[in-house]
Amino acid sequence: MVRTSAIETLTDLSEEQWGLFTRRQAESTGMAWSTLARLATRGTLVERVAHGVYRIRGAPRSDHLDLCAAWLQLAPGVPAWQRDAGTGVVSHRSAAALYGLGHLPADVHEFTLPERRQSRRADVRFHRGRVSGAEWTSLGGLPVTRPARIVADLLAAREDPEAVAHVIADALRGGHEQAATLTAAIGPFTARMGLRPGDGAALMRWLLDLTGAPERPRWLSQAATATATRSDRVRADARTVPGAGAAFEPAHEPAGPAPDPNAARQAGSQAGSQAGSERGSGSGSRPGAGVEVSSDRRRARTPTGSNETMVGQ
């Protein structure tokens, strides 16, 4: 006979976890594994939704139930409200899908964790990297990377540039991120696109041109204004520190050739083509195992035979 107290405890717990609970959480209430298995087989009180994850019958069904279950598997003994970025953050395509940004298919559940980890599930992919407090937020009860980090992660993963551009446009249109913040996030990837290293404004302009969004002039103006204001503030603050002004004086770079839009477009097309040949899915494609991504800011690598991607520390 099932103890009523155990069921009540799991029901209360599941209300804070999208109607879900884990086998380890059930065992912590004193419920035997055999009892849980019997309940799942009968399907009257609970149903199994993933390995070691169950749902209370009658609980509201989340729009991202499979993703929530996969996230609970990362730390099955820890309640959702006690977790932080160290136990895994929804990232990359999965994060974009949670926000409703762009149109990249999120058929694989992607998480970023600070330590190396592997999964036997073919529909789960881990990325090793640090996510600072400013780079993630809670969305629908799940920890998820913010749009600027999403865009940087997608570029590091060599996703199709046009698909990433639509993620940027949707983030700006929905007010999820500031134009200047996104411009700074994509700065480390300019050289790969055939642009001057660090010229995030040029890359932003090129990417937004791919979307054809009518709001492009306004977004670019906002990014330029915010960037100029930030630079002026940094220089002003530097001059208030004795002996620090010279270190913050803008460097006079030698005049060089202007960025070639055709070269940028060709580089972006090559990146998209390479990603498409490795993992094609719609207009956006993503790399599979064995791809090494190199940039000034981060390096991504998927070990052969593993579904873990290394992301810059």
Image (cartoon, rainbow, N blue to C red):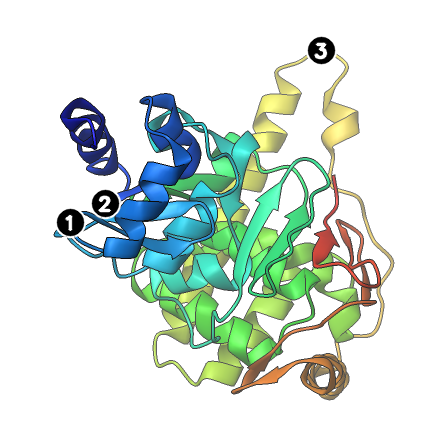
For the residue marked with disc 3, what is the amino acid?
Pro
Mark 3 lies on residue: 242
State the separation of the CA atoms marked 3 and 2.
59 Å
Instruction: Identify the residue at image location x=59%, y=46%.
Output: 112
Q: Secondary structure at mark 1?
A: loop
Mark drawn on residue 19: 2
Question: Is the residue marked by circle 2 packed among few (<14), some (14-19), or many (20+) residues within 10 Å?
Answer: many
Image coordinates of residue 18 in percent, x first then y, are: 25, 46
For the residue marked with disc 2, what is the amino acid?
Gly
Instruction: Identify the residue at image location x=31%, y=56%.
Output: 175
Please tell me which of labels 3 and 2 falls first in the chain: 2
Mark 1 lies on residue: 59
Do tag 2 and tag 1 residues touch (Cβ < 8 Å)? yes
Image coordinates of residue 17 in percent, x first then y, are: 28, 40
State the separation of the CA atoms marked 1 and 3.
63 Å
Q: Secondary structure at mark 3?
A: loop
Instruction: Identify the residue at image location x=73%, y=81%.
Output: 278
Do tag 3 and tag 2 residues touch (Cβ < 8 Å)? no
Question: Is the residue marked by circle 1 packed among few (<14), some (14-19), or many (20+) residues within 10 Å?
Answer: some
Residue closest to the far front: 1
Please tell me which of labels 2 and 1 falls first in the chain: 2
Q: Could you say which is closer to the camera, residue 84 or residue 165?
A: 84
Please tell me which of labels 1 and 3 falls first in the chain: 1
Q: Secondary structure at mark 2?
A: loop
* Residue 195 shows up from this direction: no
Q: Looking at the image, is 272 positioned above or below residue 149?
A: below
Please give left or right for residue 159 compared with residue 211 in the image.
right
For the residue marked with disc 1, what is the amino acid?
Ala
Residue closest to the far top: 242
Q: Could you say which is closer to the camera, residue 241 or residue 183?
A: 183
